[in-house]
Image (cartoon, grey):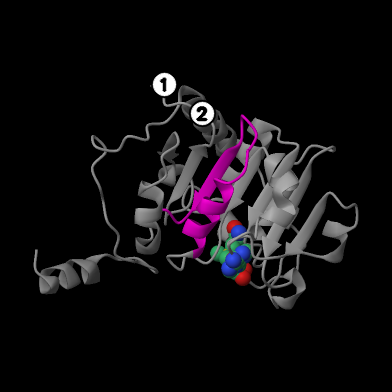
Amino acid sequence: MTLDELNRKFAEVPARHKEVSIIASMDDEPARPSRRLMDIALKAVSVAIDVALPIYEGRASREPHWFDTWPGEHYRLLAALVRTLKPKTVIEIGTFTGMGTLALAQELQPSGTLTTFDLLAWNSFADTWLAPADFSEGRVRQVLHDISTPGGIEPHRALFESADLIFVDGPKDGRTEADILVNLSTLNLSRDAVVVFDDIRVVNMIDIWRRVAQPKMDLTSFGHWSGTGLIDWNGTSDL
Ligand SMILES: C[S@@+](CC[C@H](N)C(=O)[O-])C[C@H]1O[C@@H](n2cnc3c(N)ncnc32)[C@H](O)[C@@H]1O
């Protein structure tokens, strides 16, 4: 296909937001899902069908209600993953306006904690969904720190090594997520840790996702339209 033909095809697609992506064969992809990951995905999707997200009600943000779109946006899947996995320790990388933070927080068990990392404070975003009360019990906290730099994850080693669910939703600049994966691989994540990556079909992320060698699966049709990937960090591909 010529570039002109590709541009024509692109223009024909009636969508508010569209990007060029790359599709790649699976027969030569060694990282198959584990049975456990498949099971988690199936359970979480069946929870997501019915999960409501009352946590956003009455909040002041003027952002579009992306959380109302499912499938297509990942918020119901995030809440469903927490309800399914019942994690004690959840980590999010990339707080932004807190939409993901709240979806994860809504289903946290009373003894669970959620730490959300960003480089910018949650209250520096004019359209934040978050409020001081979200942090008042200490179960949800924000940490301003770049865990993608060399050695950057070390100050938070114990937290990451205790995590059951890690949601990586950073800048997708073609570098940060790869660096986060390198840093995560220096840790002994817990046996059952599940790592979720956003935007795995965005061009900057395709190669990074493809190189993940652990059991993994693309759950885009039940998550974010730009790509949602699940990794069974310490699992074995047994399917
Ligand atoms: C796509 S937004 C996160 C969206 C949010 N998780 C959600 O589900 O609605 C990406 C965020 O990553 C933050 N970010 C950029 N580089 C980062 C880094 N190295 N570590 C942590 N957060 C970073 C940006 O400031 C931005 O707030």
Image position of 148 (left or right of 138): left
Q: What residue type is labelled 2?
A: Gly
Question: At which x and y percent is residue 225?
Answer: 42, 54
Placement of 213 over or under 84, stated as above or below: below
Residue 171 disc label: none
| Residue 214, image quadrant | top left
Calculate the distance from the C-alpha at mark 1 to the C-alpha at mark 2.
9 Å
Q: Is mark 1 on a helix, strand or loop?
A: loop
- Residue 234 is covered by the magenta coloring: no
Q: Which residue is drawn at 51% across and 51% down?
A: 181
In the foreground, 26 or 223? 26
Mark 1, residues whose alpha carbon is within 10 Å: few (<14), some, or many (≥20)?
A: few
Q: Which residue is drawn at 26% across and 65% down?
A: 13
Q: How many marks?
A: 2
Q: Name the residue under label 2.
A: 235
Q: Which image quadrant: the C terminus?
A: top left
Placement of 219 over or under 123, stated as above or below: above
Ligand 1 shows up in the quarter that is: bottom right
Image position of 117 (left or right of 28): right
Q: Residue at x 42, y 38 (%)?
A: 217
Range shown magenta: 176-200
In the foreground, 59 or 110? 110
Question: At which x and y percent is residue 221?
Answer: 41, 44
Question: At which x and y percent is residue 150?
Answer: 58, 62
Q: Name the residue under label 1.
A: 238
Q: What residue type is labelled 1?
A: Asp
Q: Are marks 1 and 2 in contact (CB under 8 Å)?
A: yes
Q: What element carries label 2?
A: loop
Question: At which x and y percent is residue 128?
Answer: 71, 70
Asked if residue 17 can be seen in this view, the reply is yes
- Residue 193 is covered by the magenta coloring: yes
